[in-house]
Image (spheres, grey):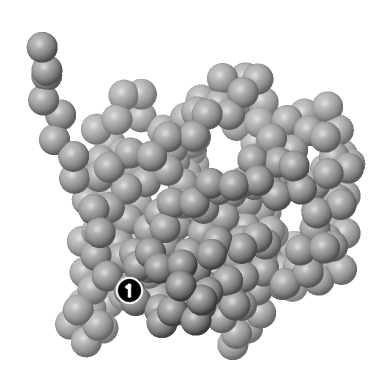
Amino acid sequence: MLIAQITDTHVTTPEVAVETGVDAIGALRRCVEHLSSLSPRPDLLLVTGDLVDRGDLDSYRLFQKALAPLGLPMLAIPGNHDSREVMRDAFVGHAGIGTDGPFLNIAGETGGLRLIGLDTTIPGRIEGVLCEDRLAWLDARLSEAPQQPALVFMHHPPFETGLTRMDGWRCGNPEGLAPILARHRQVVHLLCGHVHRAVDTTFAGIPASIGPSPSHAVGFNLEPGAELVVGIEPPMIRLLYWTGSRLISHLSPIDGVQRRVG
Ligand SMILES: [Fe+2]
């Protein structure tokens, strides 16, 4: 079972792309071509927020149109650049977008792996949070199937990356999340977005990662107080291979050239 993480695609309309100088939709199309070329093709897409840059319906339509050729099931949660209301409208009737209650939390499964997505957004804010309501929802989902391996995904990471500015905008209330993940021993991975870089660490004793954006990257700089630099790096995508008992994470370069050696 192969899961592709799509994160921080920041799709805009062509007019906005001219303003920003970032061809996010072109980057997403190249990412989709790359996913189509994989063997095996992914079985499912996990979208970890910032689908679009400005929260507008036209951009959500472009996002959907770009992914349509894959014909894959998808589970998605919002990021700080998304609009809950517009996203809900854009995906009305789609089983992979949460519709219960005020948050766009979502639960699903593939190949025996439970997939639980948390909406960490705070309208109008860059940073995120997991309030008591959202933590109670997570706790309830994990309590439903304590024997079933589970992956938890969310936009804002609850852990530091060393990138000062991004760390200032991470998910608040990590001290509320950690004991829940630690208590439910079936959680095999915590998957995040937001940082526009590939990062691997642990959180609450669980393997945790951040997926790279197929579009633009946040520059690597661990100096305290370093200013945020956004640029273009060789784009990659995170792929998660679920064997039925083990989750294996791969990074796959989008513009790589396969050439037989030897
Ligand atoms: Fe982002």
Residue 187 vertical position relative to residue 10 in the rendered view, above or below = above
Q: 7 or 76: which is nearer to us?
A: 7
Q: Is residue 259 above or below residue 209?
A: above
Which residue is rendered at x = 10% and y = 12% of the image? Answer: 262
Residue 115 shows in this picture: no
| Residue drawn at the location 60% of the way across and 85% of the way down | 125
Note whether residue 168 is visible. Answer: yes
Q: In the picture provided, is 107 more to the left or to the right than 241?
A: right
Q: Position of residue 121 (x, y in %)?
A: 64, 73
Q: Name the residue nearer the viewer: 39 or 180.
A: 180
* Mark 1 residue crowding within 10 angstroms, few (<14) / some (14–19) / many (20+): few
Q: Which quadrant would residue 250 be assigned to in this image?
A: top left
* Residue at which label 1 appears: 230
Relative image position of residue 32 (x, y in whole percent): 29, 46
Which residue is more in the foreground, 103 or 257? 257
Residue drawn at 34 percent across, 51 percent down: 67
Considering the numbered disc 1 on the image, is that residue within a helix, a strand or a loop? strand
- Direction from residue 237 to residue 120 in the image, left or right: right
Residue 230: % across, % down = 32, 73
**Vertical placement of residue 53 versus 32, above or below:** below
| Residue lying at 24% horizontally and 32% vertically, measured from the top left | 37
